[in-house]
Amino acid sequence: MNPLLAIIKKEIKEVLRDKNTLFGVILLPIILFPMLGLFVSSLIQPEVEEIQQIDVAVLNLDAGTIAKEILSNDTVRQALNQSGIRLIILNNLNIHTESDAVEYMKSNTSLRLLLIFPENFSFCIRNQIIAIIEAYYFIHENIPMQEDTQIISYVLEQIKSIISTYIIQNINPNANPVFIQNPISALPVTVYRGKEYKGVPPGMLAGVFSFQIMFAPMIILLLIMLIMNSTAMSVASEKEQKTLETLLTLPVKRTTLLLGKIIGAVIISILGLISYIVGFKFYIDSIMHSAYEEVFVAESITSLFTLSDIVFIIIVTFISLLTNALIGIIIGTFSEDTKSAGTITGVLFGPIFAISFLLPFAILRTPSMLTIIGVSLIPFVSPVIAIFMLLAREYLLFVIIIAIMIVEFIILLFTTAKIYTTEKILTLRIKLRRKRSEA
Amino acid sequence: MKYVVDVEDLVKFFGKIRAVDGISFQVHEGEIFGLIGPNGAGKTTTLRILATLLIPTSGHARIYGYDVVEDAEKVRYIISYLPEDAGAYNRLTGWDYLQFMASFVAKNKKELEQMVKEGAELSGLGDRLRDLIKTYSKGMKRRLVLARALMVRPKVAILDEPTAGLDIIHAVHVRNIIREYARKYGITVVLSSHNMLEVEYICDRVAIINKGKIVAEGTPKELKEEYNAENLEEVFIRVIKNESPTSHN
């Protein structure tokens, strides 16, 4: 008979018969995901208000004179400057076509917004037809996190008001008021990683990508918690049920016992993962469909992750799961029973979630190689940062973080095996108790 | 004569506490050997060392010639250990538990089924084996874990307080099983107990242990004669009170 298989089977059977664990696995995503969504969106939003000066590139293709008159008017420029908008007329830089303008913007990372006044601009304005201005938004970062969802509408509102004034003062003060209020309309085009997304505002694209960026780390963190809890409970429950001593005297290698517990926990975590994904999808579907149906149009346009990204994410997840299974086993070893193991993991989960989720986002705003490596030494944070580095195409840092994770896993494996293969698994708790009583 | 269990000058410290203080004893093949002594005398520590759970500070313990430290894995193939407060997995049924435990010893499915069948009979739990263990009484659990320890027919069974906390009916059941099973299959048994009458009934030989040292050793009959006592309880009290065997002659 295969002892490893017997242990794995027993571990799974025990967990699946525990109503509390099942309840936690199913209930947690329903509570956690909405809270997290609100929290992260509030984290990303405030950046918008901090922008003081917006440089806006403008390409004037107007065959008439109105666009040129408006754009070169000093009063107009002053008014826009007061609103924090500085126009950079690309025509003055000897750029005269849309494709040249797009190429220029791609290479100039300080510029994000490009407005193209169409060839028929003057014709439209004179004939009270709404002119369509293409509003290009360039996402230069590999990870779109801080995209200003309001920037296009803010700039266009200012320009719209100037054009309205221009129409009243210079063209026809008795024009249709509806037209005067809305002389132009914007066609948003978001450019990301060289791809143009016509009709997709940057905020929407960033939203879709943020969702994708958050999804992988979030699932990993939840899995980490699940597996840590699962192994901690498994060892603590052996102590509580007084089965550990018997188990340790069975004719099976202690490392096999350890492996059985880890594999059992990995299988339970994967079962949990399926529940989480179903719960998460249900949650996202319900809120997205009501608010942003078009997001799914954008989502269908592209996926942030390539196939190799997904393979690397699976590798990161797997290493992280094994490491945290071992941390759980160590926690279980120090715990007297399942209650104390639950308390320890419960106390840890809050900070783990906060640190693992907030720290990488904070670091990405001011990335420094040393800080990233330093923070990656924390076992729960490293998988999240590794994924961010992967998406940011920082392959060197990604490899360094993976190396850190592997080293941490080996150290923990060695420590846990040492605990399991010596009498420490029985005496560690005794020592702690004594220290407590001495204190 | 061949020694199955050979303990030689065994010492175990927990920090500054000397739990076992240089004890030596031998157990012959097929013998039921009892360690008796007051609480904290070092019985459980000695049995845990024999079961490869603890490492002695000094001294040696060998089972069938295998050192319990150096050859711990080999020793685990020979022994079956029943801890004093052994429990079972609450969310498994009695059948699940016996199957799980048998799977570490059985070489094939047939052997596994045979072991589980034997375990079921030994436990005497009948249809209750289909229920989750969390619904069992303490006595039922003890019968189950004892059945687990014996169903694999180990060469050496190490039983720590096998009847502790059991009512008279369960205690008699467990006692009879140990005695009958050991005789039937020639299993060598090392057990500890507080219950002197039980030890007198089951054991071929006993060692009285106090403050980590063996203070008297022999068959129940020999000890009773030596201390001029009617039963082992009297022997125990006189030994613990440090009375000389001759003072009663």
Image (tube, coloured by chain):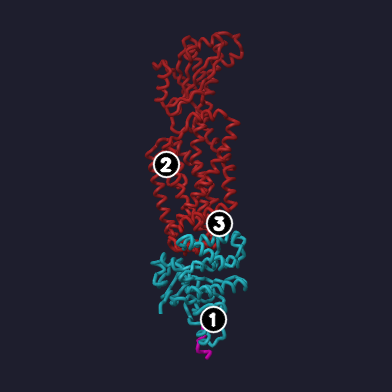
Could you give the CA–CA distance between mark 3 and mark 2, rounded to whole angstroms?
A: 35 Å
Any mark on residue A338, and which?
A: 3
> Marks 2 and 1: same chain?
no
Does A183 appear above or below B19? above
Type of amino acid at the residue the image marks with label 3:
Thr
The color chain B is rendered in: cyan
The location of residue A148, given as percent across then percent down, is 51, 28
Could you give the CA–CA distance between mark 1 and mark 3, rounded to whole angstroms?
A: 40 Å
Of A279 and A107, the residue lying toward us: A279
Residue that numbered label 1 is attached to:
B236
Q: Which residues are magenta?
A: B240-249
The location of residue A155, given as percent across then percent down, is 52, 22
The secondary element bearing badge 3 is classed as helix
Does label 3 or label 2 sit earlier along the sequence?
3
Task: Give the chain of mark 2.
Answer: A
Does A16 appear above or below B113? above
Residue that numbered label 2 is attached to:
A372
Could you give the CA–CA distance between mark 2 and mark 1, rounded to whole angstroms?
A: 68 Å
Residue depicted at 56% across the width and 74% down the height = B176
Does A230 appear above or below A201? below
Q: Which chain is red?
A: A
Q: In this orientation, does residue A290 appear?
A: yes
Look at the numbered discs 3 and 2 and tell me whether their residues touch, using CB distance below 8 Å: no
Q: Quadrant of residue A338?
A: bottom right
Look at the numbered discs 1 and 3 and tell me whether their residues touch, using CB distance below 8 Å: no
Check residue A342 for magenta coloring. Answer: no
